Amino acid sequence: MAEELIICRCQEVTQEEIVQAIADGAASVDGVKRRTRACMGLCQGKTCGRLVQGIVARETGQNPADVLPQKNRMPARPVKIGAFGGDEDV
Amino acid sequence: MYDVIVVGGGIIGSSVAWQLAKRQKKVLVLERRDSASGSAGATDGVVGYHTKKPGVQLDLAIQSINMFKTLEQELGVDIEFEDACGGMQPVENEEQWDILSAIVDEQRKSGVDIRMISAEEACALEPNLNPDIYGALYCPLSCGVNPIKLTFAFRSAAVLNGAEYRNNTEVTGFIIENGVCKGVVTNKEEIRADYVVNACGSWAGELGKLAGLDIPIKPRKGQLAITEPVGPFMKNMMQCALYNVIKFRPETIKDQTILKLGASMSIGQTRDGGIEIGATREFVGFEDENTFEAIDTMMKRAARFFPALKDVSVIRYFSGFRPYTPDGLPMLGKVDALSGFVMAAGHEGDGIAMSPITGKLIAEIIVDGAPSYNIDSFSPNRFL
C-alpha cells in the first residue's frame, strides 16, 4: 500500500519507483528525478521535492539536511512564451 | 584489477561500458556525480542526419543511426525512440537557402535523403509552422530519442552484463609507469586496469590534464527550455536554418548577439507532451546559469516560427555543456603519447546520436585491437 503511494502528483511517480531508483544508484533528488521524472512536471518539485529528499535520506542513511534539493532554475512559476518580446522578430 | 576503467558514466561512457561488458571485459565505470547529470540530462534528443558535417561525420552518423533501429530491443528498455519522425530546418531567406542547399548537395553524397522543400510543403508537414518562411530543409528519415532514458538504458544494460559503477567517485590522478597508463587514482583509492577510457564529455580536457595531456575539448554551454505538456503539436525534430549555418558557415553570420550566443532555434515535442526549445552554444567555461539575453533570443525565435507557442508556458529553463573540439569532430581511439589511454569524447552537439557507434567502435579498438570501420579521421592523435 505504502509502496503505491504517489509522491509526485504531476508525473504520477510512486514511492516504490523512487525507492527502486535509489536502489539503482540515485543518491540525490536530481538522481531520482532523472530516473523517474519525479519533480519534472508542472510544479517542478514544489510539492514533491521535500518528500523525495526525505525518501533519499531514509533509503541511503543520510541526514535529510545533507540531501541537496534539485537545482533551482527560472522561471519560479510557468511563464508564457509570448511574455518575451511579443511580435518583434530577431 | 580491471580490464578497462571508463572515466565518465554519462551517455558515451555507459555506451562504451555496455559494449565492453557484452564482450566479457571486466569494466569499472567511475562517475564523478551520477549518470545523465552533465550533458545528456540537459539536451534535446535529435538523432539526425542533416545536422552532421558532410563526409566522415555524416558517414559515422549513418552507422550510428542504423544501430538505433534495434537498440530498444537490445537494451530491453523503452528509450522513446521515434523512428523517422523527420528532421526539418525552416529557412528565412535566400542567403540561408543557398548556404543550406550547398551543404545538402554535399550531404546527399553519403546516400541520405536530405532535400530542400517549399514553404507550402513544409507547412503541410508541420501545420503549426509559420507560413512566412522562404522554404525548408527536410530529412524525412531523421529520428529522435529520450537522451536521459537512453543513458540509463546503457547503464542498466552494462550493469546486467557485469560492469561495475561507482557514483560520486572523482578521478584525481593516473598511475603511469614507464609512459604507460596503468590505472587511476581516485578520491578514495588507486585502481589498476589495462585500459583507461576518457569519456568525460565536456570535462575530458580537465581529465586529460591529470594525465599530462593537452586535450583541446572545451565546454560550450547550451541553454534550453521545456514547456508545460500540450496536445500533439509537431512531429519533426526541428532547428531553424541558423543551426546549420552557425555550425558549418559561422563566418557568414553578421548579428553579433547570434554569434556570441551561438543562438539558433531547436525545437521538438517530447513523448510527454512538453515542447523542448533551445538552444545556445556559448563559451563561458563551466558557468551553467540561464541568462535573460539567451532566453529572450530563444523564445522570440520559437514564437517567430511557431506563433501558437506564445500562449504556451515554459516550466523550466536549464542548460548543459556540449564538448567542443576545434574541428567539430570527436576524439575517438588510442592516444599514441600515452599507451593504455583511450579517448571517447568531444562530440559537441552530436553525442546522443553518436553514442551507440562510439561504444561499439571503442570496444572493438580495445578488444580486437582495431575498429571494424575506419575512424582515422577521428583519431585523438590529430591534436596530441
Image (cartoon, coloured by chain):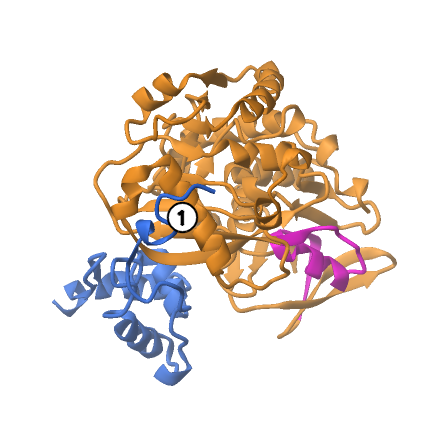
The hue in which chain B appears in the rendered picture of the protein: orange
Residue appearing at x 36%, y 66% in the figure? A22
Span of residues in magenta: B190-219
Q: Which residue is labeled 1 in the image?
A: B299
Q: Is residue B137 left or right of residue B325?
A: left
Residue A6 vertical position relative to residue B347 in the rendered view, above or below: below
In the figure, the blue chain has which letter?
A: A
Q: In what element is the residue under mark 1?
A: helix
User: In the rendering, at what x and y percent does residue B196 appear?
Assistant: 69, 54
Q: Amino acid at mark 1?
A: Met
Inspect the magenta stretch and tell me whether residue B296 lies in it. Answer: no
Image spot of residue B122 (x, y percent): 37, 22
Residue at the outermost front position: A88
Write down the chain letter for disc 1: B
Q: Is residue B241 above or below residue B94?
A: below
Position above or below: B60 against B225: above
Q: Residue shown at 30%/63% (left/top)?
A: A44
Is B194 within the magenta? yes
Q: Quadrant of the N terminus of chain B?
A: bottom right
Residue B59 in the image: state x and y as whole percent: 61, 24
Residue B248 in picture, x, y percent from top left: 64, 32
Residue name at image x 30 percent, y 20 percent: B124
What residue is shown at x 58% (from left), y 64% (from top)?
A: B287
Would you say B284 lies left or right of B307 here? right
Front residue (pair B54, B93)? B93
Tell me where residue B308 sits by quadrant: top left
| Residue A63 seen by the camera | no
